[in-house]
Image (cartoon, grey):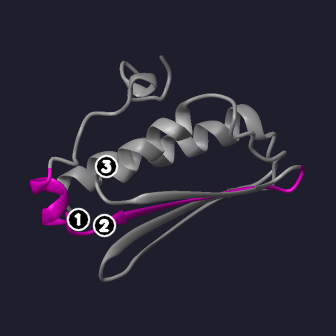
Amino acid sequence: MPDSSRRQLLPAVRECLRNCFEHAAAGRITVTSRVTRRWAHVRVKDNGIGLNMHEGNGLRCVSERIAEIGGRITVDSVPGEGSSIDVHLPLHVRPRMRDAGLLQRPGKACRGRSRTGTA
């Protein structure tokens, strides 16, 4: 796994777990991971109250950072039934992304955030 992916994996999972602990009122949280030939995948799933994607910047910032290295985050949330957040990271940085200058700094809302996801 490239260093850029490795450096983003822990903060991404940390932010997902922080949301579960602080906002979801979940009774159960499950973290699973798997690796394929091209991707590392982590799923954080809870049985809490669901996510309001219009509040806060935490997941939005993580999503921007993951996208910068060619990955993606998908969120599946149903009010009252919990949430599932999937983080997909490439095992190999795509040369066109690096060469085209697409590996850039996060947007304004994400700058200045500490490693724990708080300002």
Give the residues drawn in magenta, as a range: 80-100
Q: Earlier in the sequence, mark 3 or mark 1?
A: 1
Q: Nearer the viewer, residue 56 or 3?
A: 56
- Tag 3 and tag 1, C-beta contact below 8 Å: no
Q: Nearer the viewer, residue 113 or 95?
A: 95
**Picture residue at 48% right of the left edge, 29% below the top:** 117
Which label sits in the foreground, 3 or 2?
3
| Magenta-span inclusion, residue 73 | no
Q: Earlier in the sequence, mark 2 or mark 1?
A: 1
Residue under label 1: 1
User: Looking at the picture, how far across and down is residue 26, in whole percent?
Assistant: 79, 46
User: Looking at the picture, how far across and down is residue 43, in whole percent?
Assistant: 56, 63
Could you say which quadrant of the image residue 30 lies in?
bottom right
Q: Earlier in the sequence, mark 3 or mark 2?
A: 3
Q: Secondary structure at mark 2?
A: strand
Q: Amino acid at mark 1?
A: Met
Residue under label 2: 90
Q: CA distance from mark 3 to mark 1?
A: 15 Å
